[in-house]
Amino acid sequence: MNFLPMLQALIASNSISSVNADVDQGNREVIDILATWLDDLGFATEVMPLDDPRKANLIATLGTGPGGLVLAGHTDTVPCDEGLWQQSPFKLTERDNRFYGLGVCDMKGFFPLAIEAAKSFLDKPLQQPLIILATADEESSMAGARALAAAGKPKARAALIGEPTGMKPIAMHKGIMIEKLLIQGKSGHSSNPALGNNALHTMHDAIGVLRALQSELKANYHNPLFAIDYPTLNLGCIHGGDNPNRICGHSELGFEIRPLPGMDISELQGLLEQRLLRLGAAEGTQVSMQHFGVPAFAADEDSELVALCEKLTGHRSESVAFATEAPYLHQLGMDAMVLGPGDINQAHQPDEYLATERIKPMIKLLEELIAYYCL
């Protein structure tokens, strides 16, 4: 199967992942499609089921031995509002030298490109293996990448993650911490404050603490390699109470922190708990937190892969604020970096697209990397 039919089939398969269970889907159909294609090409395919039976990773290997190259990507997409698209997000549409479809940029479109590049090596004796890696739930929980890290595989010399970077090498990115603060109070008639414990009073104090931490992070941590050179803290969403004449019995705040490389997520989570959990004592409320974090990433200073991609693309490596699966592959001992054909400005929004002019250059780049690491 050639590039276009492959891309059509992947876009047609709904693999939305979300923290909202009502819209969360599985990626198993996409994994099975990829496994069939790669198996037919002579790859040894291993499907790694996750705890959710609808979801899995795929490790497809051509050749044997130590070392080699991993071409990695995630098979899930973010949710979408179909009414905001000019065409169905699940039907690949070509218009104005662009391919439109949910995930075409971020990042289902990477897999047909990787497979096209791999086809040039099917009849060549590989000295080191080529591995095409497809993961689940990158857009929600990183469950796929976490499962790989826990299993200690795959192993290879280098790993390229094909996230949308405009074909520029990315050697560093911030992490992301998704935090939920939960405050349980006690409702009562608002005419008498003594009848309850107001969760919003505690929330007010908590927001003050977080605003102070926001300023503290900006003042104390810097990395000039980033456009926003400090760790950001964003207060994202808040919910609480049910009526003006009732004491607020429950409130929740969702916020995020994007730490710089070198900042320890577990230490930051501990700092948050130290400053926030004690606030309920004064108001008689119960304060708890839920954490989710993806580490920041920095490629090795002497990264062979970064140097090679800088040479092949003509671009110096850069840094970005969004998070990827790179730290998990780096944790497995691979020389990792991020480079893909899409643009991050087209990701996560209606009418997501991939410019057709990027297709041939990306395939050529992948062919050169495969030749370098596998022949």
Image (cartoon, rainbow, N blue to C red):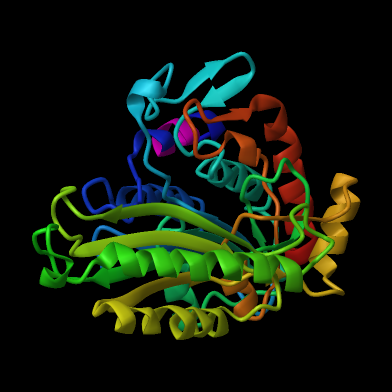
Q: Nearer the viewer, residue 181 or 156?
A: 181
Residue 61 placement: quadrant: bottom right
Q: Does the image show residue 232? A: yes
| Residue 370 in the image, given as x and y percentages of width and height | 73, 57
Does 306 lie within the magenta span? no
Q: Residue at x 43, y 78 (%)?
A: 276
Residue 308: x %, y % from top left: 86, 59
Badge count: 0
Splitting the image into 4 quarters, where does residue 187 fall?
bottom left
Q: Residue at x 71, y 78 (%)?
A: 262
Depth check, front residue: 261 or 305: 261
Q: Position of residue 184 (x, y in %)?
A: 22, 71
The residue shown at (78%, 68%) is 222
> Which region of the structure is painted magenta?
6-10
Residue 238 percent location from the top left of the image: 35, 54
Q: Is residue 62 visible?
A: no
Q: Main secondary structure of the magenta part?
A: helix
Residue 111, compared with residue 372, is above or below; it is: above
Q: Quadrant of the C terminus?
A: bottom right
Residue 342 image-quadrant placement: top right
In the image: residue 175, left or right of residue 272: right
For this rendering, which residue is in front, 177 or 127? Answer: 177
- Residue in view at x 35 percent, y 46 percent: 15
Q: Is residue 338 left or right of residue 348?
A: right
Q: Which residue of the protein is positioned furthest toward the top in this rendering?
A: 96
